[in-house]
Image (tube, helix red, strand yellow):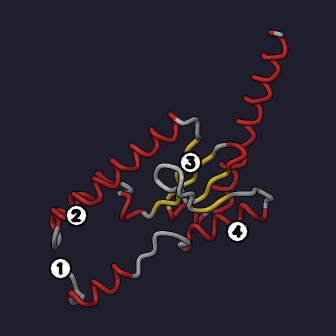
């Protein structure tokens, strides 16, 4: 049962931000501190990634647990029992489907997609930065290998 009035709930939902959230800002500051340059909320890419490292074609999403359905198999039955359960199950299911569609579109366009849960960013920002750094390193090694093989073919 919802403990808030409809007006209070409306105000809460209206104030949920789509960009520059605390988790995005936290991760961006950590990346900047490591010297990793990025763009934010790139409008010309599918899904409008929260952070984009254009030099290496890396798209990073900072996903909130509720709206993106973390542990969906456990969360879904609880939502179904709650107020307006069908609405929330449908909304979050569609968000999860859209996330998969966006991942596929970006991969098809040659981008590497990284998704972090908000709780992971909050609890262990350094580990998230390490994932990004390792991805950059792997992409650099792949590019160098491809360049070397191209040189051999000539």
Q: Secondary structure at mark 2?
A: helix
Q: CA distance from mark 2 to mark 3?
A: 28 Å
Q: Which residue is mark 2?
A: 78
Residue at the (28%, 53%) spot, across then down = 93
Q: Secondary structure at mark 4?
A: helix
Q: Earlier in the sequence, mark 2 or mark 1?
A: 1
In the rendered structure, find residue 153 and report the number of the disc placed on it: none
Tag in front: 2 or 3: 3
Residue at the (41%, 62%) spot, across then down = 65
Q: Secondary structure at mark 1?
A: loop
Q: Is residue 2 left or right of residue 142?
A: left
Q: CA distance from mark 2 to mark 1?
A: 12 Å
Q: Earlier in the sequence, mark 2 or mark 3?
A: 2
Camera-nearest residue between 5 and 147: 147
Image location (x, y in percent) of residue 45: 52, 50
**Mark 1 nearby-residue class (10 Å; few <14, some 14–19, many ≥20):** few
Q: Earlier in the sequence, mark 2 or mark 4?
A: 4
Q: Are marks 2 and 1 in contact (CB under 8 Å)?
A: no
Q: Are marks 2 and 4 in contact (CB under 8 Å)?
A: no
Q: Which residue is mark 4?
A: 29
Q: Which residue is mark 3?
A: 114
Q: Earlier in the sequence, mark 4 or mark 3?
A: 4
Residue 116, above or below 5: above
Q: CA distance from mark 2 to mark 4?
A: 35 Å
Image location (x, y in percent) of residue 50: 55, 60
Query: In which quadrant will I find the C terminus?
Result: top right
Residue 131, above or below 80: above
**Mark 4 nearby-residue class (10 Å; few <14, some 14–19, many ≥20):** few
Q: Which residue is mark 1?
A: 1
Q: Is residue 127 left or right of residue 92?
A: right
Residue at the (15%, 62%) spot, across then down = 86
């Amino acid at each position: 049962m919802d403990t808030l009035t409809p007006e209070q709930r409306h105000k809460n939902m209206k104030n949920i931000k789509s960009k520059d959230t605390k988790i995005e800002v936290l991760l961006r500051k950590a990346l900047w501190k490591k010297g990793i340059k990025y763009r934010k909320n790139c409008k010309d890419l599918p899904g409008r990634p929260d952070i984009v490292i254009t030099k290496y074609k890396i798209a990073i999403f900072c996903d909130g647990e509720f709206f993106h359905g973390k542990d969906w198999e456990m969360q879904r039955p609880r939502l179904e029992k709650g107020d307006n359960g069908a609405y929330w199950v449908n909304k979050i299911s569609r968000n999860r489907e859209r996330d998969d569609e966006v991942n596929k579109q970006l991969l098809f366009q040659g981008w590497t997609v990284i998704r972090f849960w908000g709780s992971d960013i909050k609890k262990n920002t350094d580990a998230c930065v390490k994932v990004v750094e390792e991805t950059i390193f792997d992409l650099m090694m792949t590019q160098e290998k491809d360049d070397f093989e191209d040189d051999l073919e000539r």
